[in-house]
Amino acid sequence: MEVFHTLEVKHAEKFYGQFQAVKDIDLAIEKGEIYALLGHNGAGKSTLIKMILGLVKPSVGIIEIEGFNYDAKNKEIKKRVGYLPERMNFYDNLSAWETLTFYAKLKGISKERCDEVLEQVGLSEARHRRVGAFSKGMQQRLGLAQAIIHKPNLLVLDEPTTGLDPIGISELKEMIRNWNKEGTTILFSSHNLNDAEELAQQIGIMNRGEIIAQGTLAGLQDRLGLPTKIEIDLSIIPVDLERILIEKGVETFHFEGKTIYIDCPKDKKTQIIAAVMDGVLKVKDLRLEEPGLDSIYQNIMKEAASLVNY
Ligand SMILES: Nc1ncnc2c1ncn2[C@@H]1O[C@H](COP(=O)(O)OP(=O)(O)O)[C@@H](O)[C@H]1O
Ligand SMILES: [Mg+2]
């Protein structure tokens, strides 16, 4: 039997008139993964997501969900995908319960399942209150409830953390992790690097309609060759510290007070630590910091900007 990716996008492009919002995108998500699509406003994230949802027709390219494509198997796909748009529009005068049972009826889902889902998103208590009086965070929870109600295999969330307060964000992340543990594959977009760093196994960085870098955090770090930072606290500073470090093969470093700061190529990390710890220096403490998504993102954006020539 042929095994399909949960989502596969091949050479997808989108033109609005002369303007190209999405450029030649290839992307595959495996079952059980969490994939974060990162990028500034206007990068093309929502357009790509709407193409994946079948709401915008690609000008060029193929989109397949569990091996089905929209031309032939629209209904099959709808059953498999749940979607939280950037902005949900609810009827202000309906309660959360009325709203959710409305969506459930459209999808042929039982009322018992509505109870279960309201519980999962933390809206059980507020179920009979008017949606018009809900905070942004509560509306977002209701949006999530309708996205997950039919137990989709692929859950697509467009900027789910935007507009939420820090507690709302951490609760949302917890829900995403739980659904993922139950087997749901997740694609979400964000312009917040923390969201991706904490949740996603795969990260795609979008800029001007293109995915300019894609992979795991460690993979992106390797590709960019960003250094590991080593901080070493000494109890005594020898007068010839600089010479000692150079002899140990440490190339990029500076010191402040009794702390040495070293930028070290990833593949030389253990070698340099061993050399520093050989007893010549009186080492009190040592800390390692791998480059985070923040520096990866900055570097990729810089690289992309240097390739654009007008
Ligand atoms: N329906 C549309 N018609 C014309 N241009 C559009 C349309 N939708 C989006 N765009 C343009 O496409 C680009 C990408 O938009 P979008 O996908 O919403 O980006 P993001 O979600 O990353 O902020 C923007 O320049 C936007 O103005
Ligand atoms: Mg958007």
Image (cartoon, grey):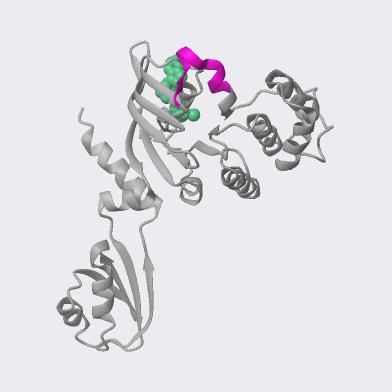
Magenta stretch in the rendered image = 67-78
Q: Is residue 133 left or right of residue 46?
A: right
Figure quadrant of the C terminus: top left
Query: At which x and y percent is residue 43?
Result: 40, 30
Query: From this viewpoint, is residue 84 visible?
Result: no
Number of residue marks: 0
Query: At which x and y percent is residue 296?
Result: 34, 49
Q: Of 240 and 89, which appears nearest the observer?
A: 89
Question: Does 102 appear above or below 149?
Answer: above
Query: At which x and y percent is residue 97?
Result: 80, 29
Question: Does 260 appear above or below 73?
Answer: below
Query: At which x and y percent is residue 305?
Result: 27, 37
Figure quadrant of the N terminus: top left
- The residue that appears at 38% across and 50% down in the rendered structure is 217
Question: Does 179 appear above or below 65?
Answer: below
Query: From this viewpoint, is residue 116 visible?
Result: yes
Q: Residue furthest front?
A: 1
The quarter holding residue 109 reads: top right
Residue 69 shown in magenta: yes
- The residue that appears at 41% across and 22% down in the rendered structure is 63
Question: Does 201 appear above or below 148?
Answer: below
Taking the image as four quarters, which one is ligand 1 found in?
top left
